[in-house]
Amino acid sequence: MIRALCDAIAIRHLLAYSTKAGCEQIVEPYAYGVTQAGDHALLCWRCGASASDPGGWELVRTDEMRGLRIVDDHFDSPRLGYARNDKRLSSIHSQL
């Protein structure tokens, strides 16, 4: 999983995974690291599923992701609001 996260960040490919509740998520990965609490997590933009769900920034614990896979689609430039070295990650393994 770690390699897939780092690769997706480096090549700006979307990721897909299921939550513990079984919901499918599509995200743009921006940074992967360890939180202040010691959890491995991905800083990402969750792509919205509809006009009523426009998406948004999320910090997702990797142990809550199921069936992670790289999607063929990619994103070109960082979303508004992205800043390198996000303080929610005490240690960063990979980032845009």
Image (cartoon, helix red, strand yellow):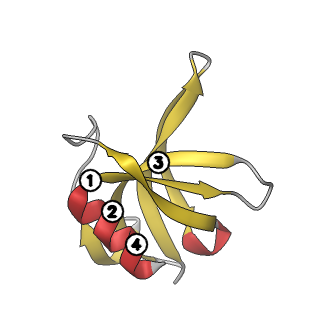
| Distance between the alpha carbons at the discs numbered 4 and 2 | 6 Å
Earlier in the chain: of badge 4 and badge 3, it is 4
Residue bearing mark 1: 12
Q: Residue furthest front?
A: 72
The answer to the question of whether label 4 and label 2 lie on touching residues, with beta carbons closer than 8 A, is: yes
Counting from the top left corner in percent of width and height, residue 86 is at: 31, 61
| Distance between the alpha carbons at the discs numbered 4 and 3 | 13 Å
Earlier in the chain: of badge 3 and badge 1, it is 1
Residue 85 visible, this orientation: no
**Residue type, label 2:** Ala
Q: Tag 4, which secondary structure? A: helix
The answer to the question of whether label 2 and label 1 lie on touching residues, with beta carbons closer than 8 A, is: yes
Q: Tag 3, which secondary structure? A: strand
**Above-or-below relation of 70 to 61:** above
**Circle 1 crowding by C-alpha within 10 Å: few under 14, some 14–19, many from 20:** many
Q: Residue at x 30, y 76 (%)?
A: 92
Where residue 4 is drawn, which disc sits there? Answer: 4
| Distance between the alpha carbons at the discs numbered 3 and 1 | 11 Å
Where residue 27 is drawn, which disc sits there? Answer: 3
77 vs 39, left or right, is left
Residue bearing mark 2: 8
**Circle 3 crowding by C-alpha within 10 Å: few under 14, some 14–19, many from 20:** many
Instruction: Specify the quadrant of the image occupied by residue 7.
Output: bottom left
